[in-house]
Image (cartoon, coloured by chain):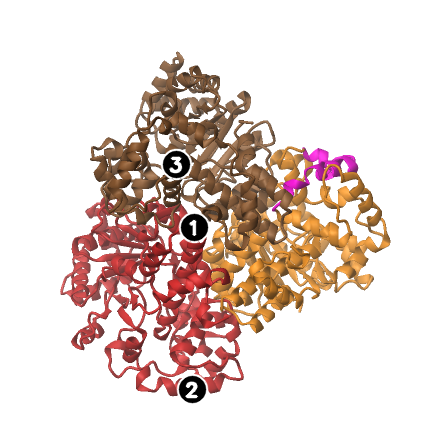
Chain colours: A orange, B red, C brown
Amino acid sequence: MAHDALLFAPSRSALAGELYAGVAALPLVCPHGHVDPWLLADPEATLGEPAGALVSSDHYVFRMLHSRGVPLAELGVGGSRADPRAVWQRFAERFSLFAATPTGLWLTLELRDVFGIEARLDGDTAQEVYDELAEKLARPEFAPRPLFERFGIEVLCTTDSLLDDLAAHEALRAAGWGERVRPTLRTDPVMRVDAAGWAESVARLGALTDLEIGSYASLVAGLLTRMAAFQDLGATAIDVSVTRPRADTLALAEADALVQRGLRGESTGDDADRLEARLVYQLAELCFDHGLVMQLHGGSLRNHHADGFSRYGRDIGADIPVATEWTRSLAPLLNALGEDPGFGLVAYTLDESTLTRELAPLAGYYPALTLGAPWWFLDSPAGMRRYLDAVAPVCGLANTAGFVDDTRAFPSIPARHQVWRRVCCDWLAGLVLTGQLTEEDAHALARALAVDLARAAYGLG
Amino acid sequence: MAHDALLFAPSRSALAGELYAGVAALPLVCPHGHVDPWLLADPEATLGEPAGALVSSDHYVFRMLHSRGVPLAELGVGGSRADPRAVWQRFAERFSLFAATPTGLWLTLELRDVFGIEARLDGDTAQEVYDELAEKLARPEFAPRPLFERFGIEVLCTTDSLLDDLAAHEALRAAGWGERVRPTLRTDPVMRVDAAGWAESVARLGALTDLEIGSYASLVAGLLTRMAAFQDLGATAIDVSVTRPRADTLALAEADALVQRGLRGESTGDDADRLEARLVYQLAELCFDHGLVMQLHGGSLRNHHADGFSRYGRDIGADIPVATEWTRSLAPLLNALGEDPGFGLVAYTLDESTLTRELAPLAGYYPALTLGAPWWFLDSPAGMRRYLDAVAPVCGLANTAGFVDDTRAFPSIPARHQVWRRVCCDWLAGLVLTGQLTEEDAHALARALAVDLARAAYGLG
Amino acid sequence: MAHDALLFAPSRSALAGELYAGVAALPLVCPHGHVDPWLLADPEATLGEPAGALVSSDHYVFRMLHSRGVPLAELGVGGSRADPRAVWQRFAERFSLFAATPTGLWLTLELRDVFGIEARLDGDTAQEVYDELAEKLARPEFAPRPLFERFGIEVLCTTDSLLDDLAAHEALRAAGWGERVRPTLRTDPVMRVDAAGWAESVARLGALTDLEIGSYASLVAGLLTRMAAFQDLGATAIDVSVTRPRADTLALAEADALVQRGLRGESTGDDADRLEARLVYQLAELCFDHGLVMQLHGGSLRNHHADGFSRYGRDIGADIPVATEWTRSLAPLLNALGEDPGFGLVAYTLDESTLTRELAPLAGYYPALTLGAPWWFLDSPAGMRRYLDAVAPVCGLANTAGFVDDTRAFPSIPARHQVWRRVCCDWLAGLVLTGQLTEEDAHALARALAVDLARAAYGLG
């Protein structure tokens, strides 16, 4: 297969290729991801050496190696000390584990197109590839900022704790990069009143905002203050991630009592569920009032492996989805704000059974709701196709939010967008060839899926 | 692509076309839908002007427009006043929203094949298309009865409240149309004892049946009386629609107590759940005893948007599915009646995860159960393919109930059947070309899926 | 279509055929199934006459006939007396019910390739096919042992109650067949403390193991003793089948109290749930300690049809899946043992929504967990493709456990493996042709999916 036809079924590769030619060179719009903003804020930053850049920092990669028996400590995860060349060797020897996975596809494209490495990665070639990669990573043109330009990134939104001091984003603004790299306020630290460290997070929020936070009202004031600070530095969205995607009202006095119990360290799981649902609702109202988009990521149970968490921390590949309910859970919020096309709620699910059953039907009625891209465990070509097949007929593509690369692996960004764009073009070509779409519409939709929908949904237009 | 190959994958279009040639001209069997019977009962009825006929009366269409920010009031929904030409203009300007949706496909086929309109619908062509359509809709040959003949409809079953006076169906019978247009008794008004208006509905049922309904037994007597009245006018089925598809026994005294509390306006949600499950079971018994098929539509949460409901009423596109359970929920009913091939229960799901997990396994064991067509949000070509792929291997096609168009948009009926038949033929061709089916069997199954299965499942043979 | 291209999409049949050529002749590894070990242990055993061999003993076959109205008693099910030729006639007349089902495909391949029968089976040919089949089944070369050799079976694991006396497997060992036919300990009789016969099963376990079982500890001792006995006869795995796949710890005193109440016949459903979860956890620990693989089959609600169960017993095709939860339910077990690559847990689901949502994400992190083959209602070509598309991108194929034929129909074994191998080769060819996989990797993965993964996952290496 010619590289040109990557991801195109043979029977539709001619048309898919034509469609792709119209979008391949469009800028990359990156509304959601986990790139460290200092990579771009610090003009001296580099991606480091190969093992750190491609293995130890990317849970997509090291979780797979771990699943076949390599201890995380031997992969340099979570600050554990491991010789980078040994990490790389372990990775290279097992590279065939990534066959038929999107991670394997991204890595292959990244090595070839970003770093010009065509050698097949395996135990034999490991060290020579390491050398070549290390040599290139040390060159100025492989520093993050030149790569950002080379990749054609129009805008990249990072994900930042609401407790972050935003120094990186201040530096970006000062360097004239403020419109190209934007923060996104992530609310995790205050969402679960029963979580270890909740009271400390609230105290830190108070310190950051010069507020005495001792009530629900002052907690909300603190959130609002941070939202304004993020917005000042270019944020267009906040990001709320919850295991159970539920939004609900609650009398102020009750919400306040939940906060009080939390500050005294007396919260129950039920307290946490109720306050979380109230906060999701509240955050939506704040977003609505202040012109921010609300991203809602539902259904990931974080830190499934307690021992791994205690040894290596978060984001070690042990966040596992659970079933989610959206129809009833979002009813209070959608009834209150869903009719207003001025409000923007982007919902992401890890539970594919909810696509045709709940989320696409909701998005096909409520103006405020759009559907987030196929996310995380659904980011494969097959997963993208299932998503498009499920969602488009029910709510139309106009009610989707385009693509997000959702990555912390900065050099994989072009590969991820390429895969999405190619899968979309292949899918659209299939509709044209079966008479379900005109070629003209297919070109327009390819463009929409590549950039326009994301710009619109995340307020980056 | 030639029109002839619509919905056929290029690699199998020759065989798919052959299969389709064998079924394209078969009559349309329409066992379930929402066409207003007066359209056919009143010899003077017309489809009206274009905006009312194609936009304001079809929630598939106006919900999409609403989802992108057009207020329902501006679309003439629910009796709201809106200039039809302005409604049509809004619709036409946004017609590209329907790209890649079944609604878009139906509308395109309907405009072309029923009304002879080939122009691309958009903001520029809106008014000229309106004129052409309005002119045609005013012609005698575009009145419902001539269209019914032209469409080749063999039988069309409407959905009628059990409280309906059936005047339309009496008129149909008097006009000699009684076997072609048949009523279906829909039980909604009495199912939820906690619903506003339940006691009034029961009172109206009493008035219609000359019964004093003050007990569970008299409620059942009322239902049975109505079933007989429907059957007299040609009904072969009843239609039960519940959010939670559950059937259960309950001691008569308990059921009676639930009715009493309902008549006093003291019902709880739990009362409603229990009485509903009892009624589903009871209705199945009545169907079994009296030779009616029972349709069971599960999993739609009605009227999700309270404000929209209060302003525009039901059926505004805001009914949203929820997860459903069938294995345990139907166990009492299937244990009692499921073995009898003389009983017919057609179950429809909006929750695709239940197809291979629950419904197809149940239908592949119990003689009484067949699987309803891919319904509502699952009625796209992709949804139909998923349905066939999921269901056929588990219970065989013989345990499915063929197709229903389920529409209130009368002129879309041929397009909907065409899409189903084409998708089935394409799917069957794929099995033949991979050696999973003989051509002879494929021809037989195409015919079964087009007409025979529906005739058999709904007692229209 | 040429037989050679069976199950290959035309656009990829050349490459799929090449891949298949590399695996078609590999031995059959059969780690899980329900073949009666006496078929192979008794040198005089035959498969019997055609109706018994192909219809009355295979619930895949007779459930379909039952679903279209043939009473099980007329099919010779569960020891009911029915004239075999009449059973066969009923089956043959309805053979078209199996069109588009995997059962139909297996039967067709089995008749053609095992028995050399090419005639189309229908009501007219029924008796002549019966004659031909009966004649062949009576020949020595169609006895189970010669067929085992002819099929190229490397190893076949049967499923045997922990209360089985293992006489068949002792005979197999004595005959030198012990490494080719191995037992698997199935724990059903002791899992549900509220089940009829639980106390009797425990008593029988005590008798078999010369233990006085009056406590949780002695129950565990009994289980361990049996595990050792099975292992002595070649078992590499145990098999645990539960409706709700949950593993949990429980204080010994509490577990003991549950056992006591069970022995007194006082158990509740909640008791049963708690003890079952404790036993699943306990069995995993025992497997871990003693080098056995643990198979966990989740989500089948057994004996849905009470009347059928009382008349014909278990395994009449009336086991129906229910929704399952794995992420939270396996957390205690995976936290305790999941990190150890020395432990092997193979999880099978009937709930496809859990594949991308729960099981593949878990298997892509925990070394101990691999994903069982698409099982039971998911064993069609379409189901296998959905499984591969869902699972491979998330956890890689290396975290799957290859194929199991899971059958009690001994002569269908080659057909089942052939279907799996062909579907895998077709799927891999699709990845190669779209640039997602190299041909070299595809060949290696075809081999892995055919034999290597199963050998590794079930300890049959």
Q: Main secondary structure of the magenta part?
A: helix
Quadrant location, the C terminus of chain B:
bottom left
Hey, what amino acid is under mark 2?
Glu
Q: Which one is earlier in the sequence, the residue at label 1 or at label 2?
A: 2
Which contiguous range is marked in magenta? Answer: A71-100
Q: Which residue matches tag 3? A: C114
Asked whether the beta carbons under mark 3 and mark 2 sit within 8 Å of each other, the answer is no
Q: Which residue matches tag 1? A: B435
Q: Are marks 1 and 3 on the same chain?
A: no
Asked whether the beta carbons under mark 1 and mark 3 sit within 8 Å of each other, the answer is no
Disc 3 and disc 2: Cα gap in Å? 66 Å
Image point 31% across, 59% down: which residue? Answer: B448
Numbered disc 3: what chain? C
Numbered disc 2: what chain? B
Rendered image: mark on residue C365:
none
Percent across and percent down for residue A7 are: 61, 56
Percent across and percent down for residue A138 are: 85, 48
Percent across and percent down for residue B246 are: 32, 50
- What secondary structure is found at the residue carrying circle 1? loop
Percent across and percent down for residue A430 are: 53, 63
Hey, what amino acid is under mark 3?
Val
- What secondary structure is found at the residue carrying circle 3? helix
Q: Is residue A279 visible?
A: no
In the foreground, C408 or A299: C408
Q: Examine the rendered structure and indicate whether residue A294 appears above or below residue B83.
A: above
Hey, what amino acid is under mark 1?
Gly
Image point 26% across, 69% down: which residue? Answer: B154
Q: Is residue A431 visible?
A: yes
